[in-house]
Each structure stands twice: as C-alpha cells, then as structure tokens.
Image (cartoon, coloured by chain):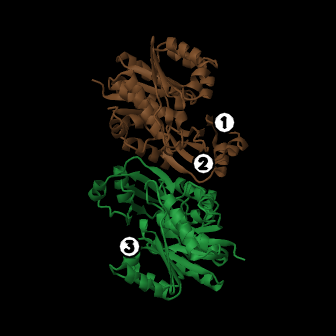
Chain colours: A brown, B green
C-alpha cells in the first residue's frame, strides 16, 4: 500500500506579495505574468521600490502539496530551505497543513528563497524570485521511501533553474517507477519552457514523466506553435496524460484518444492569480490518486484554482475537502 | 507649520495570522478577543500548534500610522525592531506606506516582536504577543523634532507593558505640549486597562493626554462599570475629547457637552477584526489634523475600520484616500 498519495518536489519559497500598477512593471523591467529570476542585488533594489507587502509560504509544488493535504490527501514534499526565520516560517506552514516535509535545511547560507510577487489590478501576478537555498537541492535530498511510497510524484519545471535539482528528480523518478508509481510534472512558465524545451520533451518522450500539467501559454511554448489545437495534438502523443488549463475557459484533459473538457468555476471577484495552476494540479492529483474519473479530477482542480484566485496568496485559506463536499464533488 | 500630521508610538510587531476554531482557543487557554502577552517558550508551543499562517506587519499604533499615510496624511512612527528578517519586513512595510520611521533598531537580540493572531469563524481576533525588541524602547528613542513637529501624537496603552516605553511617552508628550500640540492615546485592550487603570486615568486627569480612543469594553473596564452611559459620562469629564467605538453599532464622540453619534459602514462579509480600532483612529486623526468637523472625523474612522475588517491583516490593502473620495467623505 502507498504511504503517500502525492510527493511534490519544488523550490521552497516564501512569497512577498504587494499590489502595483501596470506602469510599475514596465518601469522596473518586470515581465508581466512570468517568473523572473533575480539575484541578491536586484532583490534589494526591487524590495526598496515595493509597496507594503504581506508574506506567505509559496513555491509552486509546495502550494500543490498544501492543496492536496487540504483536500485530505496524504502529501509529502522535498525542497530546500535555510535555517533562518523565513525557513522556519516555510517549514511551519507546510507541516501545519499536514504535509510530510523532512528535507535537511542549510545552515543559514544562502538564505531561504523568496519571491517578490507584484499583483496588478487585473489580478495577474508577476514574480521575481531569488532562489537562495533552493540552489542546493540535490540527489542527496531524495528520501527513497517517500519516492517509492507515493502514488504520484509531482515536480515543477522550475527545478531546472537550480543546478542539481534535476538529478534529484531523475533519481526520484527511478525509485518511483521501480515501485510501479507514476511521475508527473508542471511546465511551470512559458519562459521556463523556453529555457529547457528539449529537456522537458525528453522527459516526456523517454517516459520519465507520465503526466503533464501546463497552461495554454506553456503548451504553445513547448511546441513553438501559436495553435492551441496543434500543441494539444502533439502532447497527446508525447505523454500518457495531460491536463491543460486555460484560465476562465477551464481546462482540457487528454489521454490517448480520450478528451475531457472541464469548465472553470464561477468566481465573485478575481483578486490574485498566484497559485491557480498549482491548486488545479492539487485538486486533479487528489482526485486521481483517490481513483476518481478524469472529469471529477478536473472539476476538483477547477474548484481549488477558482478558490485560490479569490484571495491574496497561493495557498487556500479554506478547507478544500469541505468546499468540495459542499460543491457536491466529493 | 507642523512637519507631520500624526506621530504614532507603539510596539513594532509582525503579525502571524491563522484561522482556528473556538475549541482551539479554549484548549490553549487563549483569552478570546484579547491581547495575551506570552514568553519565548509559550510562543514556541503555540506556533507548533498553529495552522498555516500568513505574515503581515502590525502593531496597534503602527497600523494607525499606516492608515493615516494611506489617507494621504503625513505620519511618523517611533517603535523598536531588531536587525533581523522580521525587523526588515516591518521597516520596509511602514516606510513603503510613506511613514517616517527612524527608530534605531537593536542589534539582533531580543528579536523583533511577533504576535500570533488566531482568527475564529466569527472574525474575532485573539492575539498572543511576544514583545521581543519592544521591551527596549525608551526615552532615548524620542526624536524631539518629530515630537514637537506633529499636530497630534498618538500612542497605545499597550506601551505600559514594556518597562521603559512610558518614559518615552512622557518625554514625547512634554515636547508636544511645549510646542502647542495635542496628545492622544488608545486604551488598547480591556485587560491592559485593568493592568494600568490608575496610570491611564492619571494621564488623562493630569492633562498628559488630551484625546482618548477606546472601545466600549475598554471604557467600561476603565471605570469599572457595566453601564456604558455611566462610563461615557465619566470620560467626558476626564479628557477633552474621546471617541468610543462600539463595533457594528458605530461610535460615539464626546467633547465637553457635545455628543456626535457615528454609524458603522455596511460591510459585505466580516473576515478579520484585526486592526479595526487602529484604523478607526487613523481615519479620525487624519480628519482631525486636516481640520475637519467631528462628524467627518468619525465617518472617516468608520470607513477605514469597515474596510480593514473585510480583509485578512491589520493594514488596509486599499488606498484609503481613494476609498474616502469614492464614499464622498473627502
């Protein structure tokens, strides 16, 4: 029997979230809607220009792990923090959500990663990430029992940015497949796809990755096409199962010849899109590892994504199991 | 001409905010709705039991300073942080809001203060405050130019908890009154009033304090009566001007024989009462230092308080000047 439903692997990041107007992004050369990697110096400059902020644990796969746990799933996480106050906050939050998190922290240097997230009036988030301690994640951080004991391993494409995390991913995938488990990834960001396109395609085509999560921009970036349909046809061949999100148009799930179209949930007010994709994956993977059908998996993803974009911050303030039950999905 | 509209003095605290149910408060001996002072050991224990949280700069008078600045007022703040990551967050947030904050930080020990705030489903907040660096605030932190140059100085009754902050208050009040300025305070918390009743009454009766902010619970605690009317009659004699908030029943302002009743604004959904009193004081003092009448001061207070309780965290996410203009108050 599996010990965990979902093992997530990702950059362990504390988000620093503030509002700004469109002009601020332009004046500071921040690519809107993207994850911009920054160094210490630029982090200091941007922080000095940032408005009053709030802090919340984040990081793509960490958000997904928190989401799975909020649905009542058994989640684990690999990711690197430092032994510093932000690392303590990160560790507290993910464990308090019920996620098993035991990756050894660094002894203070480099510090725990943070991402300055600017939210524009349209709710779109533009991220500026200083990777800090994340650059030290490596194969020595793979816990074989968790890698072999989780029904699905899920990792973020962002892990191709730090130097040795990809080795941890390949080792985890090896343990997982040897135990008959499945491996999934998110393409993370269109620019991230652009940096690592060939490697991502190889992960899929070599069978290292079984299930792919992407949004429409990332999918089109992967296949360098402006045609969503062409990109969807391509990924259908390249992996066993793919779930592609399309913002307010919902999502499309493809598996072989099968296609399932999922609606987005209706929302009252779009506040902050941070975490939308992460929480879609959480809902989907909770459903998938619970043995539910693809439509139900997609609906759970839509629900979790729809809830997280109506609040500030990337992890759901509401209990997702209760919300799903009230929505008649569980 | 005054250099500042409002100088605020208070404990410089980063809030750590999580939701909990009523049973949690009882099981952990937390007095609901109150500010509970805690030591390091209890802070660690409560944090280990706390759910996933978010962090936001807080502290009563700091919130008021941020509110005044959000209305477009010129605000300054005295308060003690440490040179550590939470202190950096606190300093960033208050300065980014436009508040002049130059109190010298401690060199790391004790660390920056934090308050674990548990929000129950009814929106009520119960605070658990570790004072940390705040215990070192003293008269050496008074900047005479700001004390003499602000139209109104505002401080929190909570400052009677750390050992030497009261000396800073008395010195500031001396500078302020010598320059013909006014001094105001908030009674902060019914239990705080209970700890320092005689001293608070002496501050008012000796003329050290001209203007008092309180909620109904604090006012009744001050005069040890269950009758709101009796307490209101008493404070009318003890200070020149008092503004007493009554949650959803609005507020009452008394000055000599004059009485002004103010309505609360209608709200969509009560989320988190943290900062309600602080933001009422911000709106009131912004109006007061702008030379507006008492009714307009009270309405600005109601607006700011009503907005902050519809969000998580104690400082307004919205620009209060724009909100006040849209509400026809400015």
- How crowded pointer 3 is (Cα within 10 Å; few <14, some 14-19, many 20+) is rated as some
Disc 1 and disc 2 on one polypeptide chain: yes
Q: Nearer the viewer, residue B282 or B159?
A: B282
Q: Nearer the viewer, residue A307 or A85?
A: A307
Is A194 displayed left or right of A113 in the figure?
Answer: right
- Looking at the image, tell me whether mark 1 or mark 2 is earlier in sequence order: 2
Task: Name the image quarter holding residue A116.
Answer: top right
**Disc 2 element:** strand
Is A55 displayed left or right of B231 in the figure?
Answer: right
Rendering coords of residue A320 (x, y %):
37, 38
Q: Which mark is residue B217?
A: 3
Mark 3 against mark 1, which lies toward the viewer? 3
**Disc 1 element:** loop
Query: Can see residue B103?
Result: yes
Q: Chain of mark 2?
A: A
Rendering coords of residue A19 (x, y %):
60, 48
Q: How many marks?
A: 3
Q: Which mark is residue A31?
A: 1
Q: Chain of mark 3?
A: B
Vertical order, B159 against A51 (above or below): below
> Marks 1 and 2, Cα distance to the nearest angstrom?
15 Å
Q: What residue sits right under mark 2 in the picture?
A: A19
Disc 2 and disc 3 on one polypeptide chain: no
Mark 1 against mark 2, which lies toward the viewer? 2
Asked if labels 2 and 1 touch by Cβ distance under 8 angstroms, the answer is: no
> Which quadrant of the figure contains the N terminus of chain B?
bottom right
- How crowded pointer 2 is (Cα within 10 Å; few <14, some 14-19, many 20+) is rated as many
């Amino acid at each position: 029997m599996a010990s965990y439903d979902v093992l997530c692997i990702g950059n362990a990041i504390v988000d620093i979230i503030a509002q700004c107007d469109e002009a601020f992004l332009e004046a500071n050369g921040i690519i809107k809607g993207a994850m911009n990697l920054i160094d210490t110096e630029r982090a200091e400059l941007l922080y000095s220009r940032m408005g009053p902020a709030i802090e919340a644990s984040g990081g793509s796969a960490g958000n997904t792990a928190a989401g799975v746990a909020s649905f009542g799933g058994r989640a684990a996480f690999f990711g690197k923090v430092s032994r510093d106050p932000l690392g303590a906050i990160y560790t507290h939050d993910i464990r308090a959500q019920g996620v098993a998190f035991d990756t050894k922290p660094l002894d203070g240097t480099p510090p725990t990663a943070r991402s300055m997230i600017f939210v524009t009036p349209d709710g779109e988030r533009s991220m500026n990430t200083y990777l800090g301690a994340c650059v030290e994640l490596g194969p020595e951080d793979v816990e074989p029992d968790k890698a072999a004991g989780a029904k699905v391993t899920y990792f973020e494409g962002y892990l191709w940015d730090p130097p040795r995390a990809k080795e941890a991913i390949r080792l985890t995938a090896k343990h997982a497949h040897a135990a008959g488990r499945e491996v999934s990834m998110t393409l993370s960001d269109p620019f991230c796809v652009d940096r690592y396109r060939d490697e991502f395609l190889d992960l899929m085509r070599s069978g290292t990755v079984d299930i792919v999560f992407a949004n429409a921009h990332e999918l089109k970036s992967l296949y360098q096409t402006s045609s969503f349909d062409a990109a969807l046809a391509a990924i259908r061949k390249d992996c066993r199962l793919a779930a592609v999100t399309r913002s307010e148009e919902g999502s499309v799930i493809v598996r072989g010849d099968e296609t399932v179209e999922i609606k987005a949930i209706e929302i009252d007010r779009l506040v902050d899109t941070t975490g939308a994709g992460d929480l879609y994956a959480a809902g989907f993977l909770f459903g998938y590892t619970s043995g539910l059908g693809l439509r139900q998996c997609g609906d759970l993803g839509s629900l979790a994504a729809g809830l997280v974009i109506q609040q500030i911050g990337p992890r759901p303030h509401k209990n997702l199991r209760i919300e799903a039950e009230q929505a008649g999905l569980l």
